Image (cartoon, grey):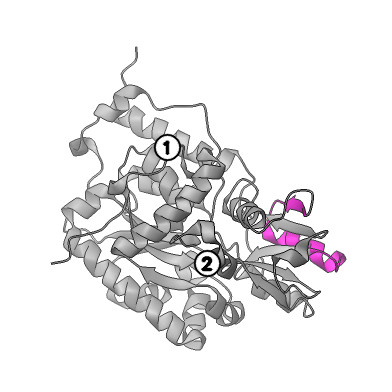
């Protein structure tokens, strides 16, 4: 039996994660003017390629380490998961406290975490669980930074989910959180596949295009694409907030519709806890500043290339940007991942993360 050395271990793990996040679906489109990907989920179909059993024997001393002299490397995705960090990123242009990058899709950010090129990252919540499983527990989630951003958008009145009976929903995100969330909420509210037709598109821009051609369609869209759709289709004013529906669904318990989180490599958390905690404090302050002044924040967001300024200002109030840490984070995120897991184990990387997935420092 071949024994993988450290270099081969990283290569195998890199390949596995890229396949998990990319091979099962089309590449994320490049946003055009006035549009953004709004990535808050990623497909996570299973891959038969496995990491050899010997990889679990690789010691932490062999992993890429981060020394106290180096600035923390922070990465985020264009869309809601990075909007709340806008003030932190803008302030960092002057302070240079961190090495920052804003990328376009989960399959660009995941390899950087695996290789140790990124210490902290804002990613979709299901990607965090996949990372944890595929790195054998070497990733921790630090906070929840984005709650539900999914909305059903239509031209005709949509007072509640019952209004969808006999209708056609057009959506992007098959095999990812949008599909799991939609099907879960439809079922829990008494609607079956016979009651509602769902047509799946490869990207959100196609959803908006389909709605422009057929006024009877209902679109499943995340912010900031809701804002984009309403800009292009001024009569698409009826909204159903799936976060509100989730919170009213009895079986969801104390969970929450968690779309985005901050994660860190466990080695970094262990060796640089004070730095990680300081970053979290700044992230919290950044979210508060963005929510308090969407006009100013939209300028930061536009300058950073996250979302066009005009879209950002309108989208921020509906983007559910938050900072939830500790036990509250564990409770709402574990419940959400359980809902995904019960629909498809592949959605979270094959297993629910253990308790060490959640960064819950002792409060002294």
Helix, strand or loop at disc 1?
helix
Which quadrant would residue 1 be assigned to in this image? top left
Residue of label 2: 247
Residue 355 shows in this picture? yes
Figure check: 139 above or below 53: below
User: Residue at the spot x=79%, y=79% of the render?
Assistant: 235
Q: Position of residue 361 (x, y in %)?
A: 21, 60
**Which residue range is magenta in the image?**
196-217
Identify the residue at image location x=23%, y=52%: 268
Foreground pick, 260 / 205: 260
Query: Which of the numbered marks, if any, corresponds to residue 75?
Result: none
Q: Is residue 184 magenta?
A: no
In the picture, residue 64 is in which quadrant? top left
Which residue is situated farthest in the top direction here?
A: 1
Real-space Cα separation, disc 1 to disc 2, in angstroms: 37 Å
Earlier-in-chain disc, 1 versus 2: 1
Q: At 53% from the left edge and 73% from the top edge, which residue is drawn?
A: 319
Q: Residue at x 40, y 76 (%)?
A: 287
Tell us which disc is closer to us: 1 or 2: 2
Q: Is residue 3 above or below residue 252?
A: above
Which circle marks residue 14 in the picture?
1
């Amino acid at each position: 039996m071949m024994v993988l050395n450290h270099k081969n271990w990283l290569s195998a793990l890199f390949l596995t994660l890229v396949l998990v996040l990319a091979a099962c679906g089309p590449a994320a489109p490049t946003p055009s003017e006035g549009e953004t990907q709004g990535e808050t989920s990623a497909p996570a179909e299973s891959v038969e390629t496995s990491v050899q059993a010997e990889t679990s024997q690789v010691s932490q001393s062999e992993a890429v380490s981060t020394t106290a002299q180096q600035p923390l490397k922070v990465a985020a995705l264009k869309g809601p998961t990075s909007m709340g960090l806008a003030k932190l990123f803008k302030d960092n242009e002057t302070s240079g406290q961190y090495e920052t990058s804003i990328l376009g899709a989960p399959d660009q950010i995941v390899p950087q975490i695996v290789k140790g090129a990124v210490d902290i990252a804002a990613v979709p919540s299901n990607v965090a669980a996949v990372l944890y499983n595929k790195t054998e527990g070497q990733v921790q989630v630090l906070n929840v930074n984005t709650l539900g951003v999914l909305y059903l958008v239509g031209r005709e009145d949509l007072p509640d989910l019952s209004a969808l009976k006999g209708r056609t929903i057009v959506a992007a995100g098959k095999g990812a959180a949008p599909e799991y969330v939609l099907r879960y909420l439809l079922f829990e509210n008494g609607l079956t596949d016979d009651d509602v037709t769902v047509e799946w598109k490869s990207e959100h821009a196609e959803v908006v295009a389909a709605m422009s051609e057929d006024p009877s369609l209902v679109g499943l869209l995340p912010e900031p694409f809701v804002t984009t759709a309403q800009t292009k289709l001024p009569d698409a004013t009826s909204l159903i907030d799936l976060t509100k529906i989730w919170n009213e669904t009895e079986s969801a318990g104390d969970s929450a519709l968690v779309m985005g989180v901050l994660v860190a490599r466990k080695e970094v958390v262990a060796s640089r806890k004070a730095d990680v905690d300081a970053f979290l404090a700044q992230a919290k302050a950044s979210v508060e500043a963005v929510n308090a002044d969407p006009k100013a924040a939209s300028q930061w967001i536009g300058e950073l290339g996250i979302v066009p300024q005009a879209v950002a200002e309108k989208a921020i109030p509906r983007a559910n940007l938050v900072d939830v840490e500790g036990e509250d984070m564990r409770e709402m995120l574990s419940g959400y991942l359980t809902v995904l897991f019960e629909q498809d184990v592949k959605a979270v990387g094959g297993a629910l993360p253990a308790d060490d997935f959640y960064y819950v420092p002792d409060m002294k």
